[in-house]
Structures are given as structure tokens and as C-alpha cells.
Image (cartoon, grey):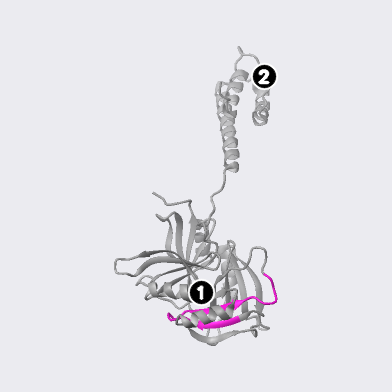
Amino acid sequence: MSKRSPAEQLDQAISALFSASQPMPEPTANRGVAALLSLVRPLRAMPRPEFKASLKSDLQRRAAMNEATAMSASAKPVPFRRPGFDNIAPYFLVHGAPRFLDFLVSAFEATERFRVPRPDGTLMHAEVAIGPSDVVELADASELYPARQMTTHLYVPDAHAAYARALEAGATSIRPPNDNHPSGDRWGTLIDPFDNTWFVATPRGWVPGPEGLRTVQPYLHIHEAHKMIPFVEAAFGANASGVAESPEGVILHATIEVAGATFEISEAHGKFQPAPAYLHVYVPDTDAIYAQALRAGATSVTPPSNAPYGDRTANIKDPFGNTWFLATYLGGPQS
């Protein structure tokens, strides 16, 4: 004989309580059912059938809700990130994306994950991994999504070696790696053949935490960068750390964490002027973050929808001109 559910136990017990011809029900081992029955016993002698029926229905509903809540709590949650996508990915839209992919492989020892070509040979979408697993995305620019010159900070084991490979692959030197950067890191700057800026660095004098150091960090130079921090806090629930300010309150550098992934900002200055970026970030709830971002001052590009590759996606533009591709992993391709 199959074990009766708590709802079935409650139904039988209430029926016995409300029937003068049936004996009082035996005590139950289910604490939830026993607690609900304790509320009913004083009402056994009440004469109105409609009251009894209403009470019975309400108690059964409560028992079913408690059982469903317990089952939901024990279910294994689906990760909100696509497997192998732990960072905020810079999304490069360039003219000649296949050549740009080849540059990333040669200069930074990137590993191609996949590519989706169009019939004319351009790329609809492609991904590479740099370092242990950090993702860089790329595609050929279009009228809807034009090319942008972006800035990216790379942490590599050997800044001099990475810098030399990048120059050999066609990059232009701005500042060779040296130990004079204010952060204390060994740091160099170069521009790739597609006019994107790369800061290539190796940490010195400090050791990354137990989770290691993100290889790929999008870097945003912003006018009035101090306004970016309250925006991302309100829009994404972000946290700012390592905030370095001048005596006048100018942001010299800050690292901002969104849903466990990070990007960096500083005040625009000299050669490093604002260059609005395309950024792809996984968040626990695309719909909620999309709504928060609009309330915080962002504008909608595309509202939330389910993508065929298994993400819940939405696109927004922040007040500084950056486009954010928001996504929540749904567990696989959707029909």
C-alpha cells in the first residue's frame, strides 16, 4: 500500500472529525498535519456544514502549499551562468572579425571556443578563451551594432612575453611593460590593429586571493566616473572595491563586481578618452536587473526574452553610452 501524502492524511482526519458516526482519528506522525488538526478539534461540534466545508478546503490548501514549499527548497538550483562563462565578457564588434580572432590567438594565446560564420565569410558570433577560462566575444560590426574601440585589461603570467607576441601579431606599442605603474604591477599598453587598447599586466608584490585573478577585465574610461559607481550599485546590485580617488574626488581607479564578475573604471584623461563598450554579463534574474537598470537611468535596447540557445536575455544602454547584454542561463537550448 502506497504511503499517503500529508494532504491525504489531513483529508481523512478532517472527515473523521466532522463525522459523528466515525471515531476520533488516531494521532498522526506528521507534525504539520497534527498541528493543523489541533486547530480543528474544538470545532468538531459546530453545526454549520458550509463553515466546515470552507475550513476543510482552507486547511487542505495550506497543507499542499507547505508540501510544495518543502519540495521546492530541496530542489537543486540551476546556475545562472552558462558553464565556462564566469567573467564579464568584452564583446568586440569589428570590421574583419575572422582576422581579429586570429590576432587574439596569436597575441594572447587565446583558444577558440566556437564561431558562427555567415555565408559571406563574416562572423555572426564567436568566442575565445584567454587564460584558464575567461571569455572574449566578437563578431563583425553591423548597422545595428557598429564597431567600437574598446579597452581591456589582461592579467598574464609574463607581461613582457605577451607584449612581444602582440607586437609580432601586428599591435602597436604605446608603453612597454615596466614596474612604474601606481598599482605596483608590471604594466604595458598597446593598441591592436583594430584600434582597441590593451593593458597587459603581471601582478607584483601581492598575491591574488584563493579564487585567483580574472585574466580578462573590461576597462572603462568615463567622464565623471564617480557617477558610475552609484549607477551600477542601483542598476546591478554591484559592489565597488579598491576605489582610489584624487584629493579632488576624481576616480583614479576602481574595480566593480557584478554578480561575482568584475570590470574596472577610471576617469577619462589624456589619450584615454571615453570609448563606449559592449559588455556581456550573466545575472541571477535578467528581468529583475533589466527593470532595476531602467529605474536607475539606463535605456532599453531590447526587452527580456528567451533566446534559442538557452538564455533569458535583454539589452540596455547605461547613461555613459555602454551597451550591456544581460543574460540568465536557463539550463540549455529552448524549444
- Where's residue 272, x and y in %? 53, 83
Q: Splitting the image into 4 quarters, where does residue 126 fall?
A: bottom left
Residue 185 part of the magenta segment? no
Residue 223: x and y, percent?
54, 80
177 or 73, which lies in front?
A: 177
Q: Where 203 falls versus 51 (above or below)?
A: below
Looking at marks 2 and 1 on the same chain, the residue that comes earlier in the sequence is marked by 2
Q: Which mark is residue 274?
A: none
Horizontally, is 56 left or right of 279 in the view?
right
Res 57 visible: yes
The residue depicted at 43 percent of the width and 80 percent of the height is: 194
What residue span does the magenta drawing correspond to?
A: 187-207
Residue 304 position, x and y percent, is: 44, 58
Name the outermost residue toward the left. 120
Front residue (pair 302, 272): 272
Q: Evaluate if marks 2 and 1 touch, with contact meaning CB atoms under 8 Å apart.
A: no
Image coords of residue 82 (percent x, y):
50, 57
Count of numbered labels shown in the rendering = 2
Q: Specify the label residue 108 is tagged with.
A: 1
Q: Label 1 crowding class (10 Å Cα cut-off): few <14, some 14-19, many 20+?
A: many
- Of circles 2 and 1, which is in front? 1
Q: Is residue 189 magenta?
A: yes
Q: Nearer the viewer, residue 301 or 120?
A: 120
Secondary structure at numbered mark 2: loop
The foreground one among 20 and 51 is 20
Label 1 residue SS? helix
In this rendering, the answer to whether 74 lies above or below 180 is above
Q: Which mark is residue 26?
A: 2
Amino acid identity at mark 2: Glu
